[in-house]
Image (cartoon, rainbow, N blue to C red):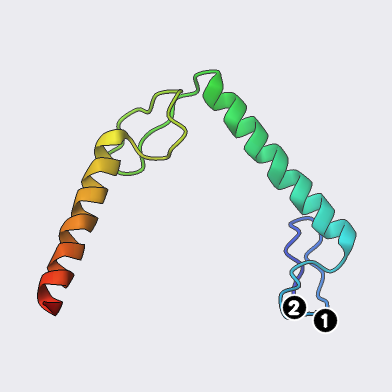
Amino acid sequence: MICLNSECKKDFVSKTHNQKYCSDECCRVSTNKRIMEKYYEKKAIKNGAPRKCKGCSSFLSRYNDQPYCAKCIKSKSSKFKKDLMGIIDDIG
């Protein structure tokens, strides 16, 4: 198995079925890197960095912490409800 740490990439034999890193140090480094990426992403959002909705590409508000705008969230939930009602009708 290959270590998931982008700086290491060593080949190792895993001791458990879900081991992803070759050592505790690699795990710590990767975790800290991921935490810092999220921190700077949230900081940029609060400072007004432009972001686009993943559904319709409209610009998101800095107060919206979701990756989708309210319009896309509403359309997805209404589509889900419609599909669910169709399944219920098919069963009954």
First along the sequence among labels 2 and 1:
2
Q: Which residue is mark 1?
A: 13
Placement of 6 over or under 17, stated as above or below: above
How far apart, in angstroms, are the residues tagged by discs 2 and 1? 6 Å
Placement of 91 over or under 46, stated as above or below: below
Residue 12 point in image, percent of width and height: 83, 77
Count of numbered tags: 2
Placement of 7 over or under 62, stated as above or below: below
Helix, strand or loop at disc 2?
Answer: loop
The residue under label 1 is which amino acid type?
Answer: Val
| Dot 2 and dot 1 residues touching (CB under 8 Å) | yes
**Res. 81 image quadrant:** bottom left
Q: Which residue is mark 2?
A: 1
The residue that appears at 49% across and 19% down in the rendered structure is: 48
> Split into 4 quadrants, where in the image is the C terminus?
bottom left
Residue 27 or residue 92, whichever sits in front: 92
